[in-house]
Image: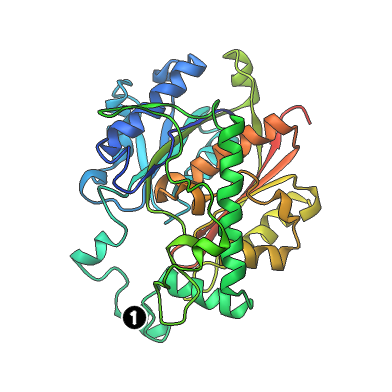
Amino acid sequence: MREAVIVEAVRTPIGKRNGALAGVHPVELSALVLRELVARTRIDPADVDDVQWGCVTQLGDQSSNIGRFAVLAAGWPETVPAVTVNRACGSSQQALDHAAFAVMSGRQELVVAGGVECMSRVPLGAARQMGEPYGTTARVRFGGSDFSQMSGAELIAERWGLSRRQLDEYAALSHERAAAAIDSGAFARQIVPVPTDAGRFEVDQGLRRGTTAETLASLKPVSREGGVIHAGNSSQISDGAAALLVTTPERARALGLTPLVRYHSGAVIGADPVLALTGPIPATEKVLDRAGLSIENIGAFEVNEAFAPVPLAWLADTGADPARVNPLGGAIAVGHPLGASGAILMTRLVHHMRDEGIRYGLQTMCEGGGTANATIVELVGN
C-alpha cells in the first residue's frame, strides 16, 4: 500500500459565538482556506482529485453539500468534485481519513481534507427545531435517553470521580497554555487571516486571559442542579475552517513540496451512546495497537476538549504524560467549531510536531452518538 503525506495544513483563527467571523458565510470561509492551500503549495487546483469537507449542522447556510460550493467559491475548476462528511465532531478528522485512504489505495493522488462550522449562523441543536433526530426505537433501546453530550459529560465526571475543582483547574490550564501558544507565535504559520468588515482577524478569539479555578467557581452548572459541568469547563460555541493537502511522497516530490508528516495509522470505534464522550479511550487503544506503538512513543496528543471530563478520563485510563496532552490549550480556551475541529486540531498538531521535532503525534475526538476517531501521524524524516 502507498504512503500518504500531509504537505500543507492551514486554518482560520477561531471566532467566538457572534464574534469576528459571524458575518462571514461558511462557504466563503471554506473558500478562503482552499485558496490559501493553492497559494502556499502552488498546485494547480485542476489536479485535485477530490475535496472531503466536514460539516455537522448541514442546514441553512451550511446545506446543499457545502464542500462543493466552497470549491466553486474558491474559483477552482468546476471539474473538481467535493463531498460533505458528517461524523459529528469528528467530521473533518474523518475527512482526513477518507483522503488518506483514497491516496493510500492508489485511487487518487491529490486530495484536500478539511471542514467548516459557523455556529453563529447555524446553532448547535438547530436540527431539533425541525423534527426528531434520533427516532423512537433508538431512544427506547437506551432507556429513553436524549443522547445529550452534556449529560454524558456529567456521567463521565461521576464515573471517574472527577470533582468540580479538578475540572475547573483543567479548564484554567487550557487557557494558560493557549495564551502561551498565542504569545509565542506558535499559531502564526498555520493561520490564514480573515478579512472582515471590522478589519483583519488573525488571532483565536475565545481566549480569556487570567482564567483561574477560582474565577470559574462562580459559574452555575448548566446540566442539572448540583452538577459539575458549566460554560467555563466546556468547549466554546465557535466559527472556523481548516484545510489540509494530502498526497503521496512521490507526487509531493514532483510538485516540489516538502511533506510535514506522513499519515501513519487511523481507527474509528463505536462506544456507549449515552456516555457519548468516552470513545477516545478505546479509539486510542485501537490505533496504537494497529500502529504497533505504545502510549509512551507518542510525543504530542490532541484530545478534543469537548468538556473537561473528556481529556481527564482519557488521561486516567491511558496513563499518558499530561504534559504532552493538549500542550497548546484546546477547545475550552479557543473554541470548537464542530465540523472544522478535526482539521483544526490536526493542523495544530502537525505544526507543533515540526516546531518541536516530535516524531509521533496522536489526535482523537469524541463524537455525538458515541463514536470516536483516532489518528497517528509521523514526522517525515524520522
Residue depicted at 41% across the width and 87% down the height: 143
Indicate the quadrant containing the N terminus: top left, top right, bottom left or bottom right: top right
Q: Quadrant of residue 278?
A: bottom right
- On the question of residue 178 being in view, the answer is yes
Indicate the quadrant containing the C terminus: top left, top right, bottom left or bottom right: top right
Residue depicted at 41% across the width and 26% down the height: 193
- Say if 276 sits above or below 108 in the image: below
Along the viewing direction, whichever of 240 and 7 lies nearer the viewer: 240
Q: Is residue 379 left or right of residue 139?
A: right
- Say if 367 sits above or below 301 in the image: below
Along the viewing direction, whichever of 3 and 163 lies nearer the viewer: 163
Q: Position of residue 91 (x, y in %)?
A: 44, 50
Along the viewing direction, whichever of 79 and 335 lies nearer the viewer: 335
- On the question of residue 4 being in view, the answer is no
- Say if 260 sits above or below 291 in the image: above
Numbered label tally: 1
Q: Position of residue 78 (x, y in %)?
A: 28, 24
The residue tagged 1 is 137
Along the viewing direction, whichever of 104 and 320 lies nearer the viewer: 320
* Amino acid at dot 1: Thr
Q: Is residue 147 left or right of residue 301?
A: left
Q: Position of residue 135 (x, y in %)?
A: 29, 75
Residue depicted at 50% across the width and 54% down the height: 332
Colouring mode (rainbow / by chain / secondary structure / one colour): rainbow
Task: Sort mark 1 into few (<14), some (14-19) or many (20+) by Cα contacts within 10 Å.
Answer: few
| Helix, strand or loop at mark 1 | helix
Q: Is residue 73 left or right of residue 365?
A: left
Q: Position of residue 95 (x, y in %)?
A: 47, 43
